[in-house]
Every structure is written in structure tokens, then in C-alpha cells.
Amino acid sequence: MNITNSRISGLHKMSPVERLKKVVEVTGLGDDVISHLSNTGNLEAATADAMIENVIGTMNIPLGVATNMLVDGQDVLVPMATEESSVVAAVCNAARQCRSTGGFTTELSNSHMIAQVQLLGVSNPEFARLQILEHKPEIKAICDETDPVLLKHGGGFRDIEVRILKGRTGLMVITHLIVDTRDAMGANAVNSMAEAVAPYIAKWTGGKTYLRILSNLADRRLARARATWSLEEIGGAEVRDGILAAYDFADVDPYRAATHNKGIMNGVSAVVLATGNDCRAVEAGAHAYAARSGQYSSLTQWEADADGNLTGTIEMPLAVGLIGGATRSHPTAHIVLDIMKITTAERLACTIAAVGLAQNFAALKALATTGIQKGHMALHAKNIAVMAGATGDEIEKVANELVTHGKVRVDVAEEILKGMRE
């Protein structure tokens, strides 16, 4: 049955149950769909309905825990929400292999975010730039008055920058509001400040303000992590050199760097999602930062120290918070932070950076030794078994057979399952 009209009047006014029934009716699906989507797991339908629009159910993602993480001398368990096999295992293995050399050392540059105000229609942009800079005290007062709660917690306006850009529509004057958002990600706070300041910028310069919004290139909020892996732990100089060669490839070739950084974000995004933070914002900032030189490149750097050990570092924007959004409203996000024993946004960002570095090490080591598919497909075998129809104890048995045969495919799994059941 095709949908003849996607225009469903008043859908947003219905309850989640009513909405689900209406969608099933329009699409011609059965009661089994209603039964499945009515089970919203550990997120109540009413809570989900308050988080986004037109809710009809939830999409549950597996939540795993990465072990062995030693960050700044402290052991931490790191929950990770992901659907991809081998991601959690990779972090566990990478973290275990650098525990003997102290684990991960981290820092956060600041908790500063940028809001941008776009000004058009001024014939003398250099003059307008100075006009804006001269009003820094007034801008500070406007921003701090916009969010007194942030000010109370030690945050608030810190500085301004004014840039002149040439676009297709002509010259534009862009004001950056630099705001310390403390333990909040800060999007709502800085957006409100930009909205409040914009009319004054227009008044002072005689131009017209248009866009007033934060930047997800949070390069004033850089999380850094470093770690050392000894030759003994990683399997010798040949493995180290293979990792360095793999990194070198990613550092000079955008085609390789895209997959290299995707692997890093496998770990980063899994923790960001588990804590109820904005995955899209973090991912956008990370990839923009990776291209800051004019060529898209690696977010990590790998070297050998004077003793021949492998050293890795990562530096990336990580705008995450503990206040607001799903971090506050999603009950699982609360539990995740409790498991991690995280009480500040700074510690969260630093831990996420360490996970990203661990993930990258694991991927590079796999590429430099057995190849990425061997370990990944072994862990992916359970997914294939389920896709083939295996249930209960059958899943493990079919997965083991797939790995033994070295053919992790659905058609092979179906044959194995058929044979077992016969």
C-alpha cells in the first residue's frame, strides 16, 4: 500500500499513542507495529514526547561500557551508545595496552563558545569594525544581563572579535561574542546573547544585522589527550612503524583522513550520545577543525619517542555539557554520568577526547597488523546471526561457525542455522 497523502492534519496535537495509530493507519501497517513501537523501553513516552515533535516511539541503541580507561590518574568506566560492532571492544583493548605507561593525560583549553552576528549594508566595513570594538563594555553588559544564571556560576561574556569577510553578496562584518559557558554546552545561552546584541550593532553602525547564532567550530574549547604505548605492549617496532605509516597516509590524504577520523568519532560520538549531548554539533566541529589548514587531515598525531615507544595525541573541539537538553531530560544520560563519576563538563570533554584517541589507536593497530576486517567481522558475526533469524543460544553458535568458516555473511549464516535446526 502506497501513502497517497503525507499531509496528516493535527498530528502534532495528538498523544504519542494516537499519533502512532494514525501513522499505522495511513501506512497500512499492522498491529504488530503498534505493539513494537509502543514499547519505549526505559524512556517514558511522555518524556520522549517532550523532547522532540510528533513522537511515535523510541529507537533503542545498545549501551556498552568501555573498561580499562585510566584518565589523569583516575580509573573511569565509560558507557558508550553505538550500534557498530567492535567499537567498545576497541577502546577496552587500547586502554589496557597503555595502562602500564600511565594511561591518558588530558586537558581542556577553555569552556568558551562563539556566537556570531552578521552585519550587512555598511559601505565602510573597517570603520564599522572599530565602532563595534569600541562598544565592548556595552556588549559585555548586554550579554551578561541576558543570562544572569550563567554569570552567577562564573561564566558569561569574555571578549569580542570582529572580522570582515567577502562573500557573493558583498562585504560582511562578523562579530564574534566569546562566552564562557562553564558546565553548559551553551548553545541557548550564546544564541540569546547574539539576539540581544544584534540590534545595538545595527544601531551603532547603520547597517542591518541578519544571522545571529553560535558556531559549532568551538576552537576556543579544545580537548586534548595524549598517551604512550610501549613496544612491548603493542607487539614491537614493526607494529609501531605500521601504525606510523597508516597515520602518515591519513595526515596527507583527505580520502584516507575521512575514514581515519570517522573511526575516532566512532568512540567520541558514542560517549556524546550516551551522555545526552549533541552528536551533530560535536561531529561538525571536529570535521571543520580537521580542515582548518585548508586541507582535511587527521585529528590525531602519532610519533615515536626517544625510547622508540609509540606516542599519540589528539586535539579537537568538544562542546559538551552537563546542563540542559537531553543531558537533563533523558534518565539514561543521568545514569551514564553517574557511572562515569563525572561532575564537570571539563572532565567529560577530556574523557571523551581520551576515548577518541584510544579508538584511533585500536583502528590503526588493526590496519597495521591483521587488517580491520578480521576483528570487526568476528564481532559483527552476532549481528549477522540475528539477521539470519538466530535466537537465544543459536546466536553464539552461528556466530562462532561464521568466524570459523571465515565467511561472515547472511547467506552463510542462514545455511548454518538451517543445518543446526534440522
Image (cartoon, rainbow, N blue to C red):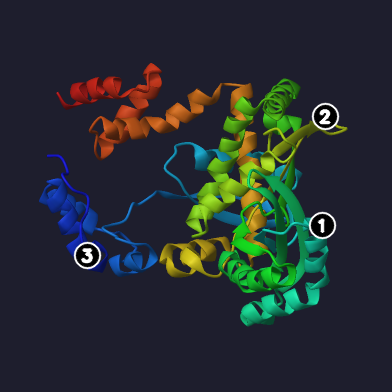
Are dots 2 and 1 in contact, CB under 8 Å? Answer: no
Q: Quadrant of residue 211?
A: bottom right
| Circle on res. 214 | none
- Residue 271 appears in the figure: no
* CA gap, disc 3 and disc 1: 51 Å
Amino acid on which the number 2 mark rests in the picture: Gly
- Tag 1 residue: 126
| Foreground tag (2 vs 3) | 3
Alpha carbon distance from label 2 to label 1: 52 Å
Residue at image mark 2: 308
Q: Nearer the viewer, residue 194 or 71?
A: 194
Q: Quadrant of residue 242?
A: top right
* Helix, strand or loop at mark 3: loop
The residue located at (63%, 47%) in the rendering is 169
Quadrant where the C terminus sits is: top left
Q: Position of residue 391 (x, y in %)?
A: 24, 38
Mark in the foreground, 3 or 1? 1
State the SS at label 1. Answer: helix
Q: Position of residue 371 (x, y in %)?
A: 56, 22
